[in-house]
Image (cartoon, rainbow, N blue to C red):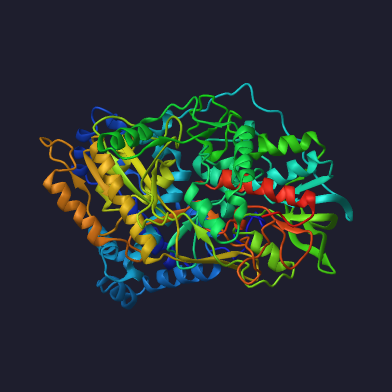
Amino acid sequence: MSADPFRYRQTAALSLNDAQLATFQSIADIFLAPLSREEEDALVQKFKSTHSEEDVRRFCRMTSSSLNTLPSVFDYVDRTVLSNKKQELSMVLSLLTTKAGTFALTGHFCEFKDIPPADKEKVMLSWKDSYIPQLRLLYKTFHTLTCHPAFSMHSELGDCMKHNTVQERVFEEVPEKLPMLRDIEDNARYDVIVVGSGAGGGVIACQMAKAGKSVLVIEKGEYVHELEFGIKEGAAFRRLYENGGASPTLDGAVNMLAGSVFGGGTTVNWCASLKLQHFVREEWAKNGLSYFLTPKFAKDLDLVYERIGATTDGIEHNGSNQVLVDGCRVLGYPVADIPQNTSGKAHACENCYAGCRGGIKNGTMNTWLRDAYKQNAKFLPKSKVSKVIIKDRKAVGVECIVNYKKKVSIYADKVVVSAGSLQTPGVLLRSGLNNNNIGKHLKIHPCSITFGWFDRPIRTFEGSIMTAVSTVAENVDNEGYGAKLEVPCLPPGNYSSVIPWLGSANFKEKMLSYESAVPIIILCRDRDSKGSVHYDDEQNQIVEYALSKHDRQSILAGIVASLNVLVAAGARELQTGQFGVDPFVFSPNEESRIDNPKFIAWREKVIKYGLPDEGLPIFCAHQMGTSRMGISPKLSVTKPTGETWEVKDLYVGDASLLPTATGVNPMVTIEATCLHVADCMLNDQPSKL
């Protein structure tokens, strides 16, 4: 079982026999393979003005075997992959240890490890280009499993990519440590227990404490102070995220990322602080949630902005964000600065996905929860709520496992479940609630990515992460659904796993081109895709998600717009995440223009290929709706007040409340909505809607 029973998958460790292990190693050595002397020489020449010959040749010769990456791969698998999927992986590897199985999957009548390296590469590329989704999934799975752990855990790879210039900085003025409870007595009592410390839990804890209530916040993640945050990608994901990193949906189609640390998602958010747009407010109000069109909601949004210091003051676009701005301006596309929760301070955060080491980002840890602490709220980290204690249809406390081992019961007048859209349904179900909507209606922001490579250094990994947004494709159906264009944080591990692997030499060339790359994410507002979360016997969350035809078209519209933006800003080479579309390269004598006939023809190929199942990476960092509020228990889990329909004094306070996808980073919307929930708790009467 996992070393962290509260945050990682609770499954048996991946166990392979010698033959399976040899096969897995041979696959890893294809995705991270040594290059020929001729290929080395070509890359030395290509990068002679930016990289030392020593670094290029060293990088070209690195392999999975030489770096011993398989232990990192196994650790990644054990944290993020469900038991049945490990069994499927083991079965595929078993097939590839036999001549018959290898022939069926590759056309070669020998064991996979005995196929010549050049032919192994052709096999992987044939899986990538296959018309069979299951073979494309095999390619995607082995690409992710072999490359992401290698590049996120083995810094020597990043050093050759010139990521090594991101240095440790010393921040002198950081907030003082918040005191944490190390233990708690059985049968302790508080006025309010809040399960979770993220955007919703932090706000509600603050408001309850300010009202004079005794408050206990229980967080299954650990408390990490600013001085304890690091800059190592792999270590950050292990320490700060659910399942220790991105974990796949049941069918492997979407990778989900969610914070699991004191402060929740606000601790690892990229500072984007966007208000809910008018058309989403109107949509929610039409469904009976009129609060979202009231002056009260507008005021709550303003209160959130004030407390977290959300403003566009102090923004300095990094290279990639400036490309997004420049390209949009050339084309006349709408583009705007994204308010940052940094109180107007300059913030070249670079690694805020790994926590803000300067204490400048105003997550709940340094705003609402610090306010709550000043009003005597208590915090219990590394502790998981097993269930809510319910008597006579009223919440009276929680059962909790403290520090992985000690079971206690803690009592309260009111309980708020703010465990996030992937975990709140589990708490409710374990507590005996049986509303049919619990865990259903999962809404996300499915994302794809495009890349442009420029003839100058961009260094997307330096400076502020996400400071600009274009809404050019946000309303493709004229009903408020579409996609936004933004710039992501993309450290080496993530970069390595979202660029299509087109062969060993091409892959290493793209990795060495890291500092000239500009990534743009296409963030789709999920309209009618089908999503849900449920749990196995070990309480591992199992996410099912089927991307709809409508949402595929939204993403595709965003992909096309992003390519136009990159070209307009001067990109010399372009690539989407689509497995079946080769990159586009402007000739040396060609100007980067969107009216270039060859570019137009290539863009049509992008549109024609579309988004087939397992045809490109899809990922998501925003999950919503699994305990949604509404005006009827037939359609929702909670009342418009946030109180569950089934149990009195049991409230939900997180993104799972939101009735649809927000279309923007949901942090500000969650915090404003939870101000409303807190007011309803204090009034203890139905909200006047």
Name the quarter where the C terminus is drawn: bottom right
- Residue depicted at x 62% and y 66%: 636
Q: Residue furthest bottom?
A: 100
Q: Residue furthest left?
A: 589
Is residue 88 visible from the viewing direction of this image?
Answer: yes
Q: Nearer the viewer, residue 374 or 204?
A: 204
**165 lies above or below 623:** above
Query: Which quarter of the picture shows residue 356?
Result: top right
Q: Position of residue 226 (x, y in %)?
A: 63, 32
Q: Position of residue 372 (x, y in %)?
A: 76, 38
Q: Position of residue 113 (x, y in %)?
A: 33, 64
Q: Nearer the viewer, residue 435 or 610?
A: 435
- Residue depicted at x 70% and y 54%: 688
**468 lies above or below 283:** above
Image-based side of 489 in relation to 195, left or right: left
Q: Nearer the viewer, residue 55 or 529?
A: 529
Name the quarter where the N terminus is drawn: bottom right
Image-based side of 211 in relation to 473, left or right: right
Q: Position of residue 42 (x, y in %)?
A: 19, 39
Query: Which quarter of the picture shows residue 307?
Result: top right
Image-based side of 341 in relation to 564, left or right: right
- Residue depicted at x 47% and y 33%: 350
Is residue 67 visible from the viewing direction of this image?
Answer: no
Query: Which quarter of the picture shows residue 123?
Result: bottom left
- Residue depicted at x 51% and y 24%: 346
**190 lies above or below 423:** above
**680 lies above or below 114:** above
Image-based side of 248 in relation to 403, left or right: left
